[in-house]
Image (tube, rainbow, N blue to C red):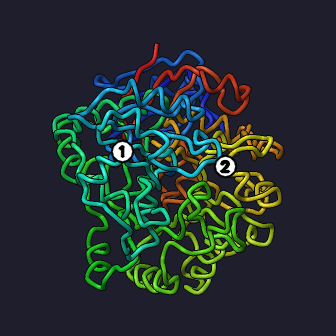
Amino acid sequence: MTASPDLILTGAEVRTLDPARPYATAVAVRDGVIAAVGDERDVRDWRGSGTEVVALDGAHLVPGLVDAHSHPVWGLDMATGTDLSGVGDLAGLRAALAGADRTEGWVIGFGLDHNAFEGRPVDRALVEDVLDGAPAFLRLYDGHSALAGGAALAAAGVTGPREFSQRAQVVCDAEGRPTGHLVEHAAMQLVERAMPRPSYAARRARLVELLAAMAATGLTGAHVMDAGDAELVGAVAEETVLPLRLRFAPWCMPGVTGAGLRELVAAQGRGGRHWVVDGVKFFMDGTVEGGTAWLEHADCHGQSTEAFWPDPEAYAVAVRQLHAAGVRTATHAIGDAAVRHVLDVVAGLGPGAAGRHRVEHIETAPDALLPRFAELGVAASMQPPHTGYTRADGTDEWSRRLGVDRAGHAWRLRDLRDAGATVALGSDWPIAHYDVRSVLATARAPRGAASAGPGLTGLEALEGCTSHAARAAGEAAVAGRIAVGHRADLTAFALDPVRAPADELTEAPVRLTVTGGYVVHRGE
């Protein structure tokens, strides 16, 4: 080491995930990167007059944990108003809305489970009488659909069906009147534009608070699957240290023009300290519960047979152009047909595509698709906490729509790892809670429809939020391991995240979180 480190972490049980040196007890950091990995006897030689030394007293130090699919900026708008995630039935929903606070006269809610409608169609008529005429906008938990009340539809000027360039819908009854069910982003945006919006100052304060809370669970980074808000993030990053590294992948939607693709290419690499634009996000389908997943065979309602891109070949053209420009892509694909199409498109890109593209979610997939991930070098990005929205007995909306056979192929984390795939793990906050300890735990012990099959081992789960997340982002040379020259992104738990039982891991104290050499969280 040519110069004294800024920070030394000592007295730790270090699991490096570096095959050259799997374990250590001390780590030195300088200028945001790991300068040395060693033992207690090395610390005296490393230490300089200005070095901060943190004694971890037996804590378990691992590479910094990364949420491979999150929306920490866009989610500020999604997770506003009344939290409806605890509502389990229609009576509970009506009670929650009757007592909900108003935001500039609006009833705004989020996190509403499709199962709360007890098998009924999503319809404003079920709740209109408890709103007392207030405009209401209730986001369903999947982020791809919402329920708007009559006053909200009127405020937005939505009086009947609309045509969209993407597969979206203002659901209407037999007489052409909107039921209030808005399916996919373009339809929801009609009402969102009319809603009250928090001030810049309020959003900034919430972002700072949110990122600090995320770091307190052990997170050091997030792959952000949207464009975020460059002005907001840039301003915060200039004023303080972002507790998480944020990698933004702006959306590419159906109908994109050549100029739009060029703008996406030009945006790559923009950023500042701890944030950057790197990649583009596509949608190949929607959600199973919303009837907008793309399945090889229709769901029990005869739905989910179409792609989000009305012309799937147009998606392929856009991916090819971005790939030729060196841009990484991530594609939301939940249904089996959607996953197949994405893999087919990547296969057509040739051998240079390996390691540059990824598929998000993969909630159901047949055996034949699994080995193709490793063969093509396509990362599987999955969100284990989503299994909590299903039920082991198959009575939930997701399972009912798919039927027994397809629901039996749910969230195949174990099978994808066995097939040699890179499997990166995340939460999809605000769809599920951002606490990375829950991501690790549910990867090992999946819930609901996925609970019958084996989960990942403790080590594989940890790799999903470290080395495999780094691979999925093309950062394996600088992240995902504790090794000299790698980023100084580090997480210290009081418990061993590999060996501790999954249920204990969800409550494991986080002793320290370090991002880019900065201590961004200190636990008790």
User: What residue is at 67 percent from the left and 70 percent from the top?
Assistant: 295
Question: How packed is label 2: few (under 14 Cα within 10 Å), some, or many (20 or more)?
Answer: many
Left or right: residue 44 versus residue 256 is right
| Marks 2,1: beta carbons within 8 A | no
Residue drawn at point x = 61 percent, y = 78 percent? 341
Provide the residue designation for mark 1: 137
Name the residue: 60% across, 26% down.
60
Q: Image quarter for residue 181?
A: bottom left
Taking depth in this image into account, of 225 and 133 the one nearest to the observer is 133
- Label 2 vs 1, first from the N-terminus: 1
The vertical placement of 433 against 232, above or below, is above
Q: Quadrant of the N terminus?
A: top left
**Residue 216: horizontal and vertical position, in percent?**
44, 27
Query: Relative to residue 243, is residue 461 drawn left or right?
Result: right
Separation of residues labelled 2 and 1 (CA atoms): 21 Å
**What residue do we see at 75% from left, 44% from top?**
395
The amino acid type of the residue labelled 1 equals Phe
Q: Amino acid at mark 2?
A: Glu
Identify the residue position indicated by label 2 in the image.
397
Query: 397 above or below 259?
Result: above
Q: Residues within 10 Å of mark 1 (few under 14, many from 20)?
A: many
Q: Tally the numbered discs.
A: 2
Callout 1 secondary element? strand
- The extreme top residue here reads 524
387 or 226: nearer the eye? 387
Residue 430 position (above or below residue 511)? below
Q: Secondary structure at mark 2?
A: helix
Expressed as whole percent of the image width and height from the top left, the position of residue 520 reads 36, 29
Q: Among all residues in the image, which is located at the extreme front?
A: 175
